[in-house]
């Protein structure tokens, strides 16, 4: 097994220069800025993908941040929107998200522009993060009496794309179907569902699919389930193979060929404020997420 880095960087959120948006930040996202030709295919227009599953512990946040890292490693520009009050995606991407830090709460409740609250990921050029703080836990209450409460994130992204460009927006949701997740579903074009290769794998997916159908019928006709990713696969067990086969039977077209294995390195990386790709690139888990990101990008180029 590959050894850990000699001096890994633990997650630290003391205020520092790289923890805030720099004055020239918008230039990096402007459509006309030159950049190297990406090695992964660029979509014809920004793909907005929400990573959602009502069931917790399925690798949802891990998938969101590592797919973002994989896309960025292929030369693409990625905006990660952390809409989970726990802020785990913000932690894994190494950005400041202590209480009071401007982020998703300010965008949804106070309608601040996204560009004023995003931060660069310190380890991944091409990745920007709209962080979530504990303040976001009160957002649902704050939004209850507001006009167009379900469309706040969509309006914010529309305003962002009027002036700035990214290839992908990856939205990490809480493990619930409340107003925060609803905002993500209304803003997104596509849904990615991580499903763990364990007993009760499809638990929660049925309710999520019902919610998707409600959103499609009332608020976002363009929303599609484009991607299912099998996570926590343990090739030593018969159960994992049976679950994978069952998922592929239910979601034949949507399920990626790549599966994400159980991996110590994947589990360790967030405690160092990193994705597994920046923590241990040559690990099995990192290579699996790279392959999944490549598959997603290639599917997008052909209209999935």
Image: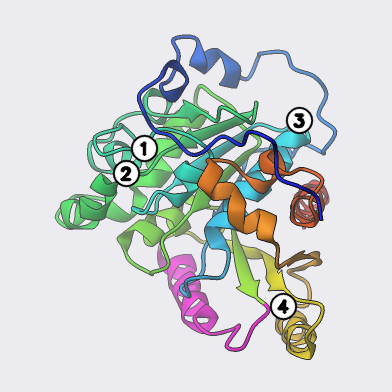
Q: Are marks 2 and 4 in contact (CB under 8 Å)?
A: no
Q: Is residue 178 above or below residue 35?
A: below
The residue singled out by tag 1 in the image is 97
Q: Are marks 3 and 2 in contact (CB under 8 Å)?
A: no
Q: Which structural element holds mark 4?
A: loop
Task: Identify the mark at residue 75; answer none if there is no mark.
Answer: 3
Q: Are marks 2 and 1 in contact (CB under 8 Å)?
A: yes
As measured in the structure, the alpha-carbon distance from the residue carrying label 3 to the one carrying label 4 is: 29 Å
Q: Is residue 169 above or below residue 195?
A: above
Q: Nearer the viewer, mark 2 or mark 4?
A: 2
4 vs 1, front mark:
1
In-image side of 72 versus 40 (left or right): left
Please state the extent of the stretch shown in magenta in the rendering.
197-218
Above or below, comparing residue 147 to residue 31 in the picture: below
In primary-sequence order, the first of circles 2 and 1 is 1
- The residue under the point 40% across, 60% down is 181
Instruction: Identify the residue at horizontal 50%, vertical 9% (top origin).
Output: 24
Mark 4 vs 1: CB contact within 8 A = no
Coloring scheme used: rainbow
| Residue bearing mark 2 | 133
Image quarter where the N terminus lies is bottom right
Say which quadrant the C terminus sits in.
bottom right
Is 263 displayed left or right of 65 in the figure? Answer: right
Q: Quadrant of residue 265?
A: bottom right
In this rendering, position of residue 213 left or right of residue 37: left
């Amino acid at each position: 097994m590959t050894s850990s880095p000699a001096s890994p960087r633990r997650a630290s959120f003391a205020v520092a220069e790289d923890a805030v948006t720099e004055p020239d930040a918008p230039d990096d996202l402007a459509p006309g800025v030159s950049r190297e030709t990406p090695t992964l295919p660029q979509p014809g227009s920004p793909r907005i993908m929400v990573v959602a599953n009502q069931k917790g512990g399925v690798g949802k946040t891990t998938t969101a941040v590592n797919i973002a890292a994989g896309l960025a490693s292929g030369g693409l520009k990625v905006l990660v929107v952390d809409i989970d009050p726990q802020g785990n995606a913000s932690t894994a991407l190494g950005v400041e998200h202590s209480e009071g830090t401007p982020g998703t709460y300010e965008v949804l409740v106070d309608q601040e522009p996204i560009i004023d609250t995003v931060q660069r990921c310190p380890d991944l050029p091409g990745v920007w993060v709209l962080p979530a703080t504990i303040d976001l836990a009160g957002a649902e209450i704050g939004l209850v009496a507001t006009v167009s409460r379900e469309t706040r994130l969509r309006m914010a992204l529309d305003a962002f794309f009027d002036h700035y460009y990214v290839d992908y927006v990856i939205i990490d949701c809480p493990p619930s179907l409340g107003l925060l997740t609803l905002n993500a579903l209304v803003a997104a074009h596509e849904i990615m569902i991580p499903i763990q290769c364990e007993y009760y794998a499809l638990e929660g997916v049925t309710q999520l699919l019902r919610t998707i159908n409600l959103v499609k019928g009332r608020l976002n006709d363009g929303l599609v389930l484009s991607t299912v990713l099998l996570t926590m696969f343990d090739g030593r067990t018969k159960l994992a193979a049976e679950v994978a086969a069952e998922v592929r039977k239910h979601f034949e077209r949507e399920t990626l060929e790549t599966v994400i294995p159980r991996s110590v390195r994947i589990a360790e990386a967030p405690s160092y404020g990193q994705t597994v790709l920046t923590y241990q690139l040559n690990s099995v888990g990192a290579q699996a997420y790279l392959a999944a990101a490549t598959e997603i990008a290639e599917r997008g180029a052909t209209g999935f």
